[in-house]
Structure formats: structure tokens, C-alpha cells
Image (tube, rainbow, N blue to C red):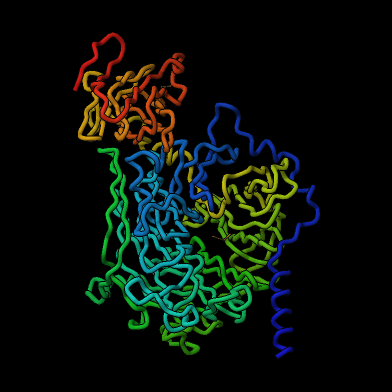
Amino acid sequence: MKKSVTLTMLSIATTLIFLGSCKPKNTNNAVTGDAAAKAYVAPGKYDEFYNFVSGGFSGQMSVYGLPSGRLFRVIPVFSVDPEKGWGYSEETKPMLNTSHGFVPWDDLHHIELSQTAGEVNGKWAFANGNNTPRLARVDLKTFRTAEIIELPNSGGNHSSPFGTENSEYIVAGTRFSVPADDSNGDVPIDSYKENFKGHISFVSVDKETGAMDIAFQLKTPGVNFDLARSGKGKSHGWFFFSCYNTEQANTLLEVNASQKDKDFIMAVNWKKAEEYIKAGKGKKQKVRYAHNVYNEQTHTATSTIKTEVTVLDVAEFKDICYFIPCPKSPHGCDVDPTGEYIVGSGKLAALIPVFSFDKLQKAIANKTFDGDYSGIPVVKYEAALYGEVKKPGLGPLHTEFDGKGFAYTSMFVSSEIVKWNIKDLAVVDRAPTFYSVGHLCIPGGNTAKPFGKYLIAYNKITKDRYLPTGPELTQSAQIFDISGDKMQMILDFPTIGEPHYANAAPAELIKNNGQLKIYKIDENKHPFVAKGESEAKVTREGNKVHVYMTSVRSHFAPDNIEGVKMGDEVYFHITNLEQDWDVPHGFSIKGANNAELLIMPGETTTLKWIPDRVGIFPMYCTDFCSALHQEMQGYVRVSPAGSSVPLSFHVGKKPAATN
Ligand code: RUQ
Ligand code: CUA
């Protein structure tokens, strides 16, 4: 007994030492020669790439320029953003609805840009919500979140949003296995092995509109799915998922899920799964999940609760899923641009296994199996292995490719990027990062066509890199020039939240994809639009007061409103009449338990306000829109309940009309 306790303690200690990070030596030799010039984008000049970076626990996506590292925009996705009224305006609140109600935050880890024929196409950016499992689609014409779909049967959507080479599907693999939504969840946690299941959602994406739908789910043994990549080229039709906790532990995972020498990469033949679904082999399951869609005509989101999903139990279909042993607690699972090589990054492994798609196919055909795991065949390690990268460094996490025959793997523990040759698996270069690098991004580095010029490391720790800012220091990214044989660090830049993964696309592709500059006022189908000042009005229905308000440089119409009473609910529906690019107006009113609105040209947006006291309430435009922005203001008079002050409104000398 005593011995086993000591052993456990020892193994905890080793694990902790191993997982801690060390600071590389030579911290001052990182930036050399012409580095600054390579990251310099002169004022007024454009960057070469857009970099879409996850905000981690901020729940948002940020957009930077490469190689300058300049921050262009924070796109609110899963978290409310008072700056843009996201989740505060009546129109956007439904976007954050879930089967649990309004969930105003999530943990956004990964970004996937939509693809055509294995290449980034500049249409959409997908993002995962890791907490209340969700998948989001951002429209790159508007840089706004256009759709969010919740994922049933899931707990923590980490293995997501990775997509196929034509974005036929974006996958969402559960990190936490949990009892299925339609089973009795009131079970002992210790019954993990019997009752907990994994689910992977295949979410289809409409080629034209981007509309998402859960096409089907695969029910799998209860393990933790971590990352994933689709096959491409020759391996199109397959998907690969890294799995840890194949020990099926439900407590103290840092020890109990680190027992086995090898966990798995799960290879999924999704084309086969698709055939079974088409043949009606899936089981319909009762579930509840929210599907939220933003409509650009009505400028309004709707949230629908859906109640059914189609599930295939992979144990019942012998040719959908195969496990490939992978040392040890694999995190990243990455596929090279040709689709032949599958790289597993075991956090606790001292080497990097590279699997061959051709060998895997042969092993499956010849049934070169090592038994099964919960009814799923386990392919013999050597039978699928192309080779191992020896002594790469400590704590391999993620790999990206440059399209020139090289792979780059992040080493969390030894804080470095290791460049290696995909063919002979020889390490050819190492560059220190500062510190504890997580994901890497090479523009297009996850696709069939990488733009192998820059590599960005997203680091977990910065320590002495920036001026201190209290107990928490900024997270950071570091850009390397990888156009030569040796990697050269050219820039550090701080990031919002915690950057996990990122994708990048050529600036030309996004810039020329038909960027939306204004919403056309004639096409505005918002039910409370006022298409000109003559349509501005205030109406009352019971205790609901609707203000049809317009904004134009530099006044609101109406800007004086009387006859609002205690007990009323006031809805300010503000239409921005401007039809010029980049002329938003803002709106705010004193005491609103809410945020500002930021209304784009031609758009209508609504702020709900429940007055809490009698008096005069100033309102004003929050966005500096013109020389007379500071004059863009008005008043609302609130009278006691039951008061006889009539509802009236005006702007300028127009007589007060009543309604
Ligand atoms: S993770 S730092 Cu959430 Cu993608 Cu590897
Ligand atoms: Cu409108 Cu300031």
C-alpha cells in the first residue's frame, strides 16, 4: 500500500516537472539583423495577410495584420461586447441563446477558414466554443458572427472547428465524454466506463450561404477528443482525431489519464459514415439544442431550439472508425499538405510519430490489428507508422507545414519551434520562443496550399517580455520569417485573451471578397425601420413604447421625447440613415442596464430601456461621427406612472405630434 502511494506521488511529481515549462537559455539572442525591417509595414501601407486569432477565454476572435502584428478588429463571437452592443442589442441577444438559456461567454480555442479544393477561399471563419459546446461561423464580408449552433450530446467542444477540404463538414468532437442527452444522466461519476460516451458532430456547411446544420453525430467510446484534422488529396474522405484519457479516468486526470504509453488517433472514414446516413442507418435521437442565425435583411437574429439529431454508433459499423496507437496523451493531430502524413503530437512523448495514410489503408485492408478498444479495431502501431522524429524537444503540441517539404512543431515544455523534414524526419532547425508556445500558424499551413513565408507562435507565458501589468501579463504572439533555411524571429506582439490557434489568409483574398460597406437603406427589412426622418415616430402599445428613431450627422430624430412613464418598457429602434462607408453612429441613454448600440450605415438596431426613476434622461451618440458629434444628443422625460403627460416627440422646430 505504502509503496503504491509513494509511486503515485513520484509519478505526480514527474508529471508536474515535465509539464512545467522551462525558459530557454540565450533569451537575448533572438532578434537579429534586418528583423525589424521584415515586420515593418509603413504607415498607410497594407499588410500581406489577415490573421484570425482565437481569443481563448475572452470568447472572441481578433484580427491582426501580418507581418505588422497590428490589431484591426475584435469580432465578438461567444461573449457579449458592450463596445459593439453584441449581446446587448435586442437583435443580437438571440445569438447567445442556448438550451441552457442566454450564455454570454465562452472559451474560443480554434479558428478554421473555409476552403475550396483544399485552399482557403476567404468566405467564412469558423470558431469553437469550448464550454457550452457551440460552433460559430463568422462572415468575412461583414466581420460579424452570422451563425452559432449548439452541439448536443457534448461536453466541451475542443476538437473543433476543423473542416474538410471543401468545407463539406466542420467537425466538433467532445472533449469531455458524458452520458448521452437522452439517457439518465443521474449516474455515479465513477460509472464513467459504462455510462459516459463520446460524440463527434459533423456539421454541414452550405457552399453558397454558409448555413450550418448538424448532418449527423458519431457515438464513440468514452475518451477525451482533443484536436482533429481532415484528410486532403488522397486522404479526402477521412478525418483524424487525437484522443487522450483512453484510460477512461474520471478523477485526477493528470495522473490517471497519463498511465498508458500510447493513446490513440482515431481515423474516421466519414464518406462511409455519410453512406450509412444516406441509407437511413442512423438513429434519430431526441435532444435539445439552439441554432441561432443572423438575418442580414431584417438585421435580426433568431434562435430556434431543435429537437432531433441523427446518431451512428461506430461500434455497430465495423468500417467507419479505427484507432491508431499514438504515444502519449496526444494533443495536436495534423495532416501534411499532400494528405499522406499524419503527425501525432504526444504531450508526454519523447518523439513525434508520423503515420502514413497509404500504410494505414493497407493495414486496414489486411486487418493488421492489435485487437480492439471498446469494439473498435486498433491498427498495429508499426503497420500505420511512416517513422518517428527522434529527440524533437519536450512537450510537442502542434504542427503546421510550409508547403516546401517541412513541418514545424511547437514544443511547449522546451519552449521552441522545431523544423523538420517530412521525408527523412530529420530535425533541421530550432528556434526558441518566449515562452511555452502552444499553437503555431503558417498562413494556409493547415491546407493543401501553405504560404510558407511567416510562422506565428502563440505563447502561453511572457514573463519578462513586456512592461509589467500587475499580476497578469499579456499573452503574446511571435512572428518568424521562415522563407529561408533558418527561422528568424522578427516581431513580438501582444494579443487579447489567450491566443490558441489561428488561421491566416492573403489580404487580397479577403479584401476583394465583396466586403460589405453599407447596408442599403432601401433593402432594410427590419420591422421597426424608419427609412427617413419623416418616418420617425414614437408609439405606445400598453406599457411598451417603441421609438422609431433615425440618426444622421449630427442629430437624432426625434431628439426630445415626453410621455414615457414609470412601468414602461422603452425600445429605441435606431436606423442609421447614412449611406457612406465607415460612418456608424452610436446610441446610449443614462442608466440603461445595457450597453451602447453601434449602428452601421443603413442598419437598424434596438436598445431596450426600463426607466427606473422619474426625471430627465440624456441620450447621445457614442461614436465620434462628425465635427458636431458632441451636439448629437437629446432628452427623454420620464413621468410617474399614471401621469397625464401625453406621448410626444420632436426634433428641431417641428411641432410636437402626439400619438
Ligand atoms: S489547444 S495549445 Cu485548446 Cu488547441 Cu493546443
Ligand atoms: Cu453620431 Cu456621433
Image quadrant occupied by the C terminus? top left
Figure check: 547 above or below 265? above
With respect to residue 640, does 117 lie above or below? Answer: below
- Residue found at x 41% / y 29%: 588
Q: Quadrant of residue 386?
A: bottom right
The x, y position of residue 149, in whole percent, is 35, 56
Foreground pick, 453 / 652: 652
In the image, 40 versus 259, the foreground residue is 259
Residue drawn at point x = 40 percent, y = 32 percent = 598
Q: Residue at x 41, y 53 (%)?
A: 103
Give the left or right position of residue 224, taking residue 33 as reference. Answer: left
Question: Given the current orientation, which residue lies at the most extreme top position?
Answer: 653
Question: Residue 368 at what x, y percent from top left?
Answer: 47, 87
Q: Give the percent coordinates (x, y) of residue 572.
A: 31, 30
Towards the viewer: 500 or 637 = 637
Residue 385 in sight here:
no
Please state if 242 lies on the left or on the right of 637 as rendered.
Answer: right
Tell me the quarter of the picture where residue 622 sits: top left
The location of residue 66, given as percent across then percent down, is 56, 41
Residue 32, can we see it?
yes
